[in-house]
Structure formats: C-alpha cells, structure tokens
Image (tube, helix red, strand yellow):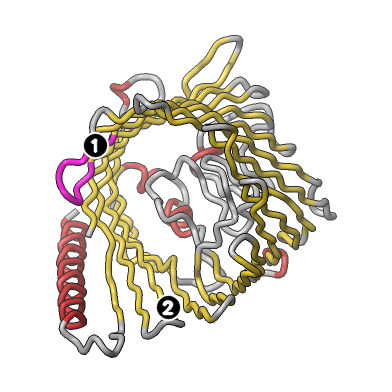
C-alpha cells in the first residue's frame, strides 16, 4: 500500500498543477487583445475515492476493496473549426478483489479499442494501478459538416437503462462509476440538412475483421418527436434499427429497437426497449422501462454475468424479458435519494438498487450506492451477492 499511497500523492499533485495551469491560461486569455480570438485551452476532471463492501448472505463475511479514480479532460480549440480532446483515466484498485478475481487487470482494460492506450503500471500485492486514454480525438466543424476522428463517444442510444441503438459504445448500467461511458476508435461524419434533420455516418474498425462496426443513422424531428433510423454492419452481422423520444402529455416516452441478422457463428437477434418517465410537481420522479432480448437466457448463475461480463449491443442483457423501475426524490437541493429495481420475468431474478446523493460542499459530492442480486432457486429467492459502495468525489 505504500506504493499505492505514493502514486495517489503524485496524482493529486499533478491534478492541482494542471488545474492551476488551466486557470493561469484562462487568465492570460482574458487579458489578451479582444479584437482577435485567443486560443482556448481548458482542463477539468475529478478525483474519486470509492470503498466497496461485498458479501453473499452474511454481512460478517464481507470483503472490502477500494478504488481511487482520477480523471483529466483536456480540450484545445485553436479556432472556430477545430477542437482537440484528450481524456485520461487513472485508477488504483486495491483489496481482496484485485488479488482473488482471475484476470482482474484484463477486466479493467477490456474495453480498450483498436489501439492499445492502456498501461498497468502496478499489478501485484493486491494493488492494480492502471492508466487508460479513453478519449483522443480531433473534430472539424464547418458549415453543416461535423467530422471527428479518433477515440470518441458515439452515443446513438436514447434511453437511460438499456440502449439497443448504441451499437458503437454499449455500456453496463451497473458500472455507475464510469460516468463518461466507453468510447470507440472511429471516424464519424455528421451533416445537418436543416435544424430538424441530419445524417450521421460512423466507422469503427476492430482489432480483427470480425469486430468491425459501420453504420449510417438518419435523424428527424416530426410531430414533436425525435426519430432516428439506422442500418449497417455490426461485427459481421447486418443490423438495422429505429428509436424515438417525445412526450405523451407531460410524461416522457422513449423507445429503441435493433435487429441483428444471423451469420454462420451465431443466431439472429432482436433487442428492444421502452421507457416512460414522469416528474411530479412535488419533486418525485418516476421511471419505468422494459427490455426484450431475444438471445437472453432464463437463469442467472452468478452476478458476474451482469457486473463483470462484456456486454454487446446484440446481447445487451442476460435475460429475455426484464422490467426496471425507479423512484427518486430531492429532499433538498443538496440531498437526493432513489430506489430502483430490476425484475426478470423469464428468469425470476430480482435486483435492488438504492442510491443516496449528498452535496457536501461546492464540487464535493457523497454517494452511497447499494446493489443486491437475488435469483429464484428451489422455489424461493436466494441472494447471489450484495455490494455497498461509498464514494466521495471532488470535481474541478
């Protein structure tokens, strides 16, 4: 742990130095000649400390692990057309999970793209220190054209919990600590026909030909709804889908559906999600969502199928039918609590997800998150695992 503590001290020092430099640079810009637009360089990010306690049925058997997570986001805009971005994640894991989970380092770096931009500086004595560049792109905007090259987030999803249209950057809902979501090594071209319609073309080559993804999406706004249609190739599967977002009176109404044709290696698939959300005047917010996954199974053997597996757009969740509901309430501008739950209609599995958020001070936030997994075995529900997370975040 001495080495891990030293690394943390270096990260904190680096963060403060970079933040100070960014503030100095901004001050210089403010004092520059206003008749000529100054180059704009910005830095932001955060440092988070996450403590996790996990047990199956007896809390006396709890295992604890820790994560120190530092993020640095750099952005440089030399003019009105070009934007260069760089995002770096520095993570220090320590505890029993690092030591006992097979291939833990591979799990942490498993979402790296075609280029290897991840480095594990330390991986021994129950400590893993990893740095990953998950954003590195150049964007050019001129007129109605927007072209981006490099590691980027291509967010084609609409919904909150499950996003079948998000074929480039499928994310795991249980990975709540990764707020930015995964990125892709890709080339993307967007063209706006008018304020209400556009076309989006993206290509993300994989490390092998079987991992290539390429698709085109059309966006249009009609009758107060945002619609999207897409078609392309997803890892040697023809794929096509659609999505929408709008309102039924005062309630939000969203949906997505994707189809994946079969090839010699696997079967055809249909993935669809539907959600309705409503904010009451008294501050209560309710979200209800459902998922259909034609490739889903009807049993949950262990929670690693949910929390540690690499999900794909074609098989976005282990179950065939799943319902999700969440209710949240802001007791004050500083304090918010929510209770969510997932239930598999086909697998009779239940997941309970409570969350408490409290703003300690400016740029300081405290999170308390719970994840409890249950599955029906021999006619009754048995716990598969429980995790409690306490997280403190400082943003700058």
Q: SS class of the residue under badge 2?
A: strand
Marks 2 and 1, Cα distance to the nearest angstrom?
34 Å
> Does the magenta portion include 364?
yes
> Does the magenta portion include 55?
no
Quarter of image, res 204: bottom right
Give the quadrant of the C terminus: bottom left
Q: SS class of the residue under badge 1?
A: loop
Position of residue 221 relative to residue 10, above or below, is above
The reply to whether callout 2 and callout 1 are in contact (CB within 8 Å) is no
Residue at screen point 61% across, 71% down = 190
Where is residue 270? Give x, y as percent: 75, 42
Q: Residue 333's mark?
A: 1
> Which region shows up in magenta?
357-365
**Which one is nearer the viewer's eye here, 221 or 95?**
221
Query: Residue beneath label 2, please?
Result: 83
**Which one is nearer the viewer's eye here, 60 or 211?**
211
Where is residue 223? Give x, y as percent: 66, 46
């Amino acid at each position: 742990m001495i080495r891990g503590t030293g690394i943390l001290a270096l990260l904190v020092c680096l963060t403060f130095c970079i933040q100070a430099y960014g503030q100095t640079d901004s001050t210089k810009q403010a004092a520059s000649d206003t008749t000529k637009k100054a180059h704009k360089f910005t830095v932001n990010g955060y440092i988070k400390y996450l403590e996790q306690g996990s047990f199956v049925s007896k809390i006396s058997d709890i295992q604890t692990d820790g994560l120190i997570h530092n993020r640095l986001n750099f952005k440089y805009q030399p003019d009105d057309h070009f934007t260069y971005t760089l995002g770096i994640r520095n993570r220090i894991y320590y505890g029993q999970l690092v030591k006992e989970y097979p291939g833990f380092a591979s799990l942490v770096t498993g979402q790296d793209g075609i280029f290897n931009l991840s480095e594990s500086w330390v991986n021994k004595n129950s400590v893993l220190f990893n740095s990953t560049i998950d954003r590195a792109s150049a964007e050019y905007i001129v007129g109605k054209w927007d072209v981006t090259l490099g590691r980027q987030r291509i967010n084609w999803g609409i919904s909150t919990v499950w996003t079948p249209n998000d074929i480039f950057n499928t994310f795991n809902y249980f990975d709540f600590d990764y707020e930015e979501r995964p990125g892709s090594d890709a080339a993307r071209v967007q063209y706006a026909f008018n304020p209400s319609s556009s076309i989006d073309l993206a290509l993300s080559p994989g490390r092998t030909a079987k991992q290539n993804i390429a698709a085109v999406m059309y966006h249009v706004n009609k009758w107060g709804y945002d619609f999207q249609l897409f078609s392309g190739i997803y890892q040697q599967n023809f794929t096509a889908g659609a999505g929408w977002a709008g309102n039924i009176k005062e309630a939000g109404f969203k949906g997505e559906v994707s189809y994946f044709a079969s090839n010699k290696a696997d079967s055809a698939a249909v993935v669809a999600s539907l959600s309705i959300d409503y904010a009451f005047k008294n501050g209560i917010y309710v979200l209800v969502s459902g998922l259909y996954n034609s490739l889903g199974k009807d049993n949950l053997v262990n929670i690693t199928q949910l929390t540690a597996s690499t999900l794909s757009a074609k098989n976005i969740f282990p179950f065939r039918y799943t319902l999700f509901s969440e209710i949240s309430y802001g007791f004050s501008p500083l304090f918010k609590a929510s209770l969510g739950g997932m239930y598999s209609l086909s697998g009779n599995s239940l997941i309970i997800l409570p969350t408490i958020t409290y703003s300690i001070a400016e740029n300081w936030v405290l999170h308390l998150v719970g994840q409890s997994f249950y599955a029906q075995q021999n006619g009754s529900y048995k716990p598969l695992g429980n995790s409690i997370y306490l997280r403190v975040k400082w943003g700058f």
